[in-house]
Image (cartoon, helix red, strand yellow):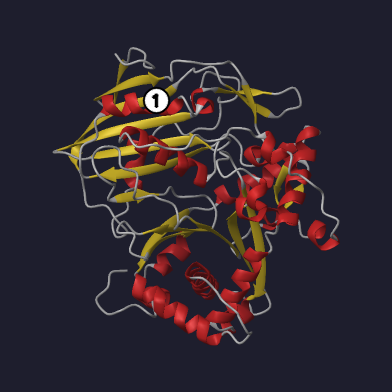
Amino acid sequence: MAKGQTPPFRTVVDSRTQTVHTVRAGTADGGRVRLTAYDLLIGPWYVPLTFFYRGTLDGAALRDSLARTLLRYPPLAGRLERDADGGLSVLCNDAGVRFTEASSPDPMREYGHRLRAQPVIGDVVREVSPFGVVSRDTPLLKIRLTQMRGGGSVLGVLINHTLADGGSALALLESWSREHLGLPWEAPSHDRGALEALGRLSQDPATRDGRVFAGVGRMRHLATSLRPGLRRRATVTTRFEADELAAMKNEALGALTEPGAWVSTNDVLTAHLWRVMGELRGQADEAEEWLGLVAGARSGLGDALPSSYWGNCVTKSWTSLPAGELRGRSLGAVADEVRRSLRSNTEDKIRDEIAFLGSHRRRGVHRHVMSARGLDASEASLSVNNWSRFPLYRIDLGAGRPFWYEFPDLPAPTVHIAPTPEEDGGRDVYLCLSESHADLARTPRWQEKLHPHAVSGHAR
């Protein structure tokens, strides 16, 4: 048995045998990593990422390389502990990562944007509850490897969101991949103090008034958090080919009149989706349509934050337009509004945000902080999370690259943008909508509205 692993135990689930291992680095310094206010924003939920491989992954070899990777990621093998002020720290005690290996009687299917794997993820990735994590012997990283009948593997990765945002989660998987393949990789920085030290309240009244986070009472926070789960939702996936996106961008650029004006492909795609979703909802002309843009805070901080910083460092910007204006504006004008909103994530705004959130944590009331727009969350708000630059299809763990990656359904109106498996400049889009809007979005009429620039014969 390799260093860093403990004897496995076997259980039976639905008449299937699975083997559960605890993977450890084999060393621990017992230190504590105090989590930042950014880390605490969402709470101890697990984010499931699922990768589908046509080749068969070697479970024992994966556990060996994971143990070596954990040497540079000690928080992942640690446990969450409550601080005296109500905050959280990770005790780096090398208690271990849970690695479950199971087999499926089903063959691998040709999953993709036309055949989502979401219905099977419940069997592939388990134990996603955020409860019973703090001050418990609960792993913060859980891996589930399922071997499919006839070959192929499904790798489920659950990482506790208090430790990492999407970019950091993918950095971990890249590190694991490189370690597994015997390639060099840079050690991450777990110095949360480097981020905390950058906090500085803004002297600009507009920045202070436009803060995207707000402190609220406990009952209002609870009611607002529970509201999205009261409505049933469904996810529609669709693919935008590279030539389709190029045509959309050309149209948008042609409508820009300001000298030097520019928008990115992702700006244009976001604008297009916002317009179509606004039209689908059919609000009155004077009603506000809100767009939330999840954005990395690292770019706003520049060199002030080490490039190797590992943890949560994500902000959000919001913009709105009257529904009638959103429908009537050109694609270029809406894309320009998207670009303007993203540019609002300045260094001053990010530093102010760090200081604002940190002050609530120090007063022990960080659990009452939430998105300011979340207070008025409704079907007229849409949140966009763009992962198109993440290396989702480069996570090679010895059996080649994955042929499909699955993002989980979410409880609020959300757009998730991802690269295509071929990384050919296209985008796969997950639209999480109310069930009634999802049903409409699947109809030929609305598919044509989603893809007005599609080249004949291309898959949607």
Left/right of residue 65 with respect to residue 135 in the rendered view: left
Q: Is residue 132 above or below residue 110?
A: above
Asked whether residue 296 is in view, the answer is: yes
Quadrant in which residue 191 is drawn:
top right
Percent position of residue 21, x then y? 35, 20
x and y percentages locating residue 178 in the rendered image: 36, 38
Q: Position of residue 95 (x, y in %)?
A: 49, 17
Figure quadrant of the C terminus: bottom left
Q: Image check: 287 left or right of 77? A: right
Along the line of sight, the residue nearer the viewer: 40 or 105 = 40
Q: Is residue 223 left or right of residue 132?
A: right
Residue at left offset 58%, top offset 56%: 294
- Which quadrant: the N terminus? top left
Question: SS at mark 1?
Answer: helix
The residue carrying mark 1 is: 68
Q: Nearer the viewer, residue 323 or 163?
A: 163
Please, what is the three-letter code of the amino acid marked with disc 1? Arg
- Judging depth in this view, the residue of 369 and 186 nearest the camera is 186
Whole-percent x, y for residue 185 in the image: 42, 37
Q: How many marks?
A: 1
Categorize mark 1 by other alpha carbons within 10 Å: few (<14), some (14-19), many (20+): many
